[in-house]
Amino acid sequence: MDTDPFRVFLEMQIQLKRNAPSSDAMTRTMFESLDGLPQEPEMLFMGCGQGNDVLELLRCCEGRATAVDMLKPFLAKLEAKAEDAGITGDRLRTVCSDFEALDLPEGIFDLLWSEGAIYTLGFEEGLKAWAKYLKPGGFAVVSECTWLTDTPSVEAKLFWENAYPAMGTFGENMDRAKHAGFELLSTRVLPEEDWWTDYYQPLIPLIAEAREAYAGDPGVQAMLDEEETEIRLYERHAADYGYVFYVLRKQG
Ligand SMILES: C[S@@+](CC[C@H](N)C(=O)[O-])C[C@H]1O[C@@H](n2cnc3c(N)ncnc32)[C@H](O)[C@@H]1O
């Protein structure tokens, strides 16, 4: 019987340190750019996966983290890493839930953080849906794959028109943030090396292993083709698109 390609995708992803391009250094830099956070912020992480951002921010400040993801195995890895790091007491709470079915108190968070996950709702829709959890004037730091040029290569355009048709330019995302009720404080493009070191480079041998393990399974091979195409596309067209961190403040 053919294997569910998503299961194989998850088997690969769980072996990685992180599940979207970023780095601990970038997470820290973005956190340190926030001016006016309380000493012990209440922080909400959306689509945290294995939660490198959660752990990094808990190292950066004395705050408390609520970490949301729909995949239990990712949260289990976060909990294990937190235990190894000696994070105890009420500093970390994991919530296994779909964003759309979240049962969290509204208006209590000082900071909303989401790396590589808001695309699942759409940038504006996600910000609109999540804003209610923030206090008035609360910060949001969200990374989103963004067109870095108005004239991308045809190859990149065709790929993303299929993979993520709503992907916006800087300007479009600034408007979307405004429509969602946020003021834009700053943006920062993720360095190219942060796509490779913890994400694409370790993924490449896992793809090769899965190719062998699931030889003759067309569904899995097609999924692996897609993964490889995405990596090769970035190799050729990193100037066309990239992850951008948007630093936002909830208005009102
Ligand atoms: C591309 S991964 C990024 C994970 C992590 N932020 C990182 O940078 O390594 C997107 C994450 O969002 C989570 N996710 C996607 N849709 C979700 C939803 N509707 N509700 C909750 N979590 C969701 C996935 O389970 C996954 O862990």
Image: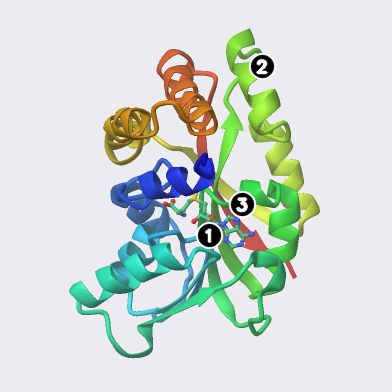
The amino acid type, in three-letter code, at marker 1 is: Gly
- Pointer 1 or 3: first along the chain: 1
Q: Contact (CB < 8 A) between labels 1 and 3?
A: yes
The amino acid type, in three-letter code, at marker 3 is: Ile
Q: Position of residue 201 (x, y in %)?
A: 29, 31
The amino acid type, in three-letter code, at marker 2 is: Leu
Q: Residues within 10 Å of mark 3 (few under 14, many from 20)?
A: many
Side of 98 where 213 appears, left or right: left
Q: Position of residue 180 (x, y in %)?
A: 77, 56
Q: Position of residue 238 (x, y in %)?
A: 46, 20
Side of 119 where 56 appears, left or right: left
Name the residue located 37 percent from the left edge and 44 percent from the top edge.
12
* Residue placed under numbered mark 2 in the picture: 158
- Pointer 1 or 2: first along the chain: 1
Mark 1 residue's CB less than 8 Å from ligand 1: yes
From the viewer's perspective, is residue 218 above or below residue 126? above
Label 1 residue SS = loop
In three-dimensional space, the C-alpha distance between marks 1 and 2, rounded to whole angstroms, equals 27 Å
Decide which of 51, 133 is in the foreground and name it.
Answer: 51
In three-dimensional space, the C-alpha distance between marks 1 and 3, rounded to whole angstroms, equals 8 Å
Q: Which mark is drawn over residue 47?
A: 1
Label 2 residue SS = helix
* Residue placed under numbered mark 3 in the picture: 118
Name the residue located 52 percent from the left edge and 39 percent from the top edge.
2
In three-dimensional space, the C-alpha distance between marks 2 and 3, rounded to whole angstroms, equals 21 Å
Q: Is residue 86 visible?
A: yes
Name of the residue lying farthest toward the top: 154
From the viewer's perspective, is residue 192 above or below residue 173? above
Decide which of 45, 229 is in the foreground and name it.
Answer: 229
